[in-house]
Image (cartoon, rainbow, N blue to C red):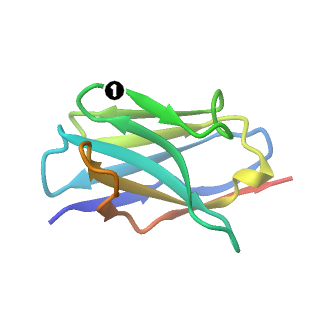
Amino acid sequence: QVQLVESGGGLVQTGGSLRLSCAASGRTFNSYTMGWFRQAPGKEREFVASIVWNTDSTTYADSVKGRFTISRDNAKNTVYLQMNSLKPEDTAVYYCAARNFLLVEYRYWGQGTQVTVSS
């Protein structure tokens, strides 16, 4: 059974940094795309970044380009989201997700981790 467990969220001041982790288990992810999404109160969930596990190809939302970096560690089966220059509008619950890279829909989701950026 696939499990995605996020960690690393917290409270940070504007301009600060956080690194989120997503520990993945239950299968091999070589043919998967791993993504980070976020949902702020009263807003729809939105895409943040993704990485194709076996090629390291990355994609970012325009709102986070140049500030966030997605990466993965094969040995630890973990995906990271390094977030720098954080802004109050980055405040949200951040979710890790996984999908077969041939598919569009993300099938597996983590429970989410709260990120709060104070002004």
Expressed as whole percent of the image width and height from the top left, the position of residue 27 reads 13, 52
**Residue in the foreground of this view, choosing between 31 and 23:** 31
Q: Is residue 109 above or below residue 33?
A: below
**Amino acid type of disc 1?**
Asp
Could you say where residue 114 lies in the image, as x and y percent from the top left? 58, 63
Quarter occupied by the N terminus: bottom left
Residue found at the far right of this picture: 119
Q: Residue at x 41, y 55 (%)?
A: 96
Residue at image coords 65%, 27%:
66
Residue at x 78% of width, y 38% of height? 15
Query: Can the viewer see residue 77?
Result: no
Left/right of residue 104 with respect to residue 112 in the rendered view? left
Residue 63 sits above or below residue 56 on the image: below
**Left or right, residue 59 beside residue 73:** right
x, y (%) of residue 48? 55, 46
Q: Residue 111: percent from the left, percent from the top?
A: 41, 69
Q: What residue does disc 1 label?
A: 56
Residue 76 visible in the displayed image: yes
Residue under the image location 64 percent in, 61 percent down: 92
- In the image, farthest residue toward the bottom: 42
Residue closer to the observer: 95 or 43: 43
Residue 77 lies in quadrant: top left
Secondary element at image label 1: loop
